[in-house]
Image: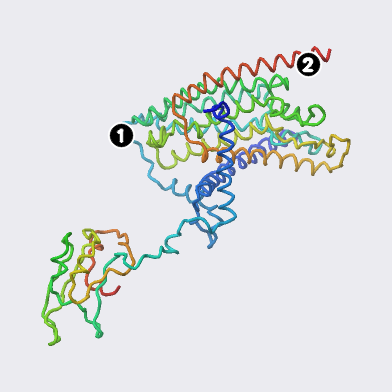
Amino acid sequence: MTPFFDIGVSVGRIGVFFAFVFGLVVIMTWVERKGAAYIQDRRGPNRARILGLTLGGIFHPLADALKFLFKEDFIPDGAHRLFYQLAPMFALAPAVMTMAIIPFGPPVTIAGKTIALQIADLNVGILYLFAISGMAVYGVVLAGWSSNSKYPLLGGLRSASQMISYEVSMGLSIVGILMVFETLRLSEIAQGQGALLFGVLPKWGVFVQPLGFILFLVALYAEANRTPFDLPEGESELVAGYHTEYASFKFSMFMMAEYIHMVVGSAVLATMFFGGWQFPYLGDAGFVFPGGVSVAVPPAAVLVVRIGSFIAKTLFFCWLFVWVRWTIPRFRYDQVMRLGWKVMLPLALANIFVTGLVLLLLDRGGV
Amino acid sequence: MSFGESLYLLEIVKGLAVTMGHMLHNMVHNKDIPTIEYPEVRRVMPPRFRGCHRLMKRPGGAPRCVACYMCATACPAVCITIVAGESPDPKIEKYPVRFDIDMLRCIFCGQCVEACPVDAIRMDTGWYTPPEDTREKLIYTIDRLLEK
C-alpha cells in the first residue's frame, strides 16, 4: 500500500502544480491583454463569448488556443527542419521543469505521513533552478538560428548575450539570501523566513536583502525576456525577434514558455524574498503579534491561509510583470549590456561582501 | 538628470503610479473609455459625410435617374457605367438600364452628386464601403443602389 500511496502523492502533486501553473499561464495571457488595454485607455478583448457571456473577455485565451491549433503548421523553405522543430520544445521544457522545486505550502501531515507541498525538495534547490532556466536560452538561440532569417537570428543573438550577462548578476544577487538562511533548499528558505527580525519585522528576504531583491527582480525580468529587457523580441526593430518565422502551435509554445517563466519567476521571487507561504506573524498554532498578543487559529485554517498567501504573492508578482511591461519602454541594446555588466554585477558583488561582513560581525557579537 | 533620476528606480515607481491610475480609473469609470464598440455602436457621421451612394426613386418606384451621363462624365475616377434605355413612361425620355458604380475605383469625391441635374444620386447613407470577398460584389448594380 505504501509505495502506491507515495506514487499517488507524487503524481497528484505534479498534476495539481502543473494545473496551477498552466491555469495561471492561461489567465495571465488574458490579464496581459486586458491590463494593457485598461492601462492604455482601451477596452481590450471582449468579443469571445460562450452562451452569450463574455465575462470581460476571459474566454479569449481559449479562442487563441483554438486558433493556434487550427493554423497551418508552416516550416520555411531554408529552415533547418530538425532544429526548427526542436526549438519550441527546448524553450518550453525547461520552463516547465523549473516549477518542480517551488514550495507551495508547508509540509502537510496526512494519515501519519508528512507530505511536502513541493514536487521535489532538492538539496541543491536554487542551483537546479538556475541550471534549468539557463537552458531556456537554447530554445531561443536555436529558433533564431534555424529559421534561416535575419530578424530571428538577431533576436537569438541578443537573447544569448543578454541571458549570459544577466545570469551572472542573477546568480550573485541571491548569494546574500543563501548566506543569511544558510541553505540552498527553497523549502528551508521559506521556513526560515517565518522568524522575526528585531522581534518586529518578518524575516523576509526583502528585509534582510533589499539590494539583493532589486537586483534579482531586474535580472529576472531580463531572464524572462520581459520589458524593459525584451530585446530578443523587439517588435519595433526585429518584427517579432526569434519567433518571427514560427506559426501555429509552435509559436504558442514559445508564448507559453514566456508566461511559464513569468509565473515560475514570480513564485521564486515570492519564495525567496517575500516569505513564500509564510503569512506575517502566523505561526503553526495561530497569530503571534510582536506585542505579545496571540490569536489561536485552527491548523487547517493556518494551512489555507499559508497556501493562499503564497498564491497571492505569486499573483502579485505576475501582475507586476504585466504592470511594468506597459509602463517602461524598452532599453537600447548597449544600455542593457551596460546595466548588466557595469551596474548590476558590481552591485551584486558589493552586496555579497556587505552581507558577509554583517554576518561576520553579528557572529562575533553573538560569541 | 539629477542623481535621483539617474537611479531610475524612483522614476519607474512614479511611472507605475501613472499607469495604475489610468487602469483604476478605467475600471471604475468604464464608460469613460473612448473606444466605440463598432458593430453595435456606430460613430455618428456629420451630415456632409460622403458615404456609399444610393439612387433616389420617383413616387411610383421607378428610378429618378434620367440617364443623362452627367455623373459619369464628372466622375474623376471613371467608376460609373450607365447604359440608357427608352423609358416606357411617355413623360420620361430615358432611364438607366444599367447603372453600375465600381466601389473599388470610387474615390468618394461627391462630384457625381454635384453633377446630377435631377438629384437622383446621393451619398448620404452614412456607410463606408463594407468589405466583400469578391471583386464582383463590390461593383454595385442599379438594384442594389436603389435599395439603399
Q: Relative to B2, is A34 above or below?
A: below
The residue type indicated by label 1 comes to Asp
- Return the x and y of residue A21 as percentages of the image width and height: 60, 40
Most foreground residue, A97 or B141: B141
User: Circle 1 sits on which residue?
Assistant: A77
Q: Relative to A223, is B81 above or below?
A: below
Of discs 1 and 2, which sits in the foreground?
2
- Return the x and y of residue A31 as percentages of the image width and height: 55, 46
- Return the x and y of residue B28 as percentages of the image width and height: 60, 55
**Color encoding of the figure:** rainbow
**Residue A314: quadrant of the picture:** top right
Most foreground residue, A27 or A162: A162
User: Circle 2 sits on which residue?
Assistant: A362
- Circle 1 packing at 10 Å, graded few (<14), some (14-19), many (20+), is few
**Residue B101: quadrant of the picture:** bottom left
Q: Relative to A2, is A168 above or below?
A: above
Most foreground residue, A129 or A15: A129
Disc with the residue nearer the chain's start (1 vs 2) = 1
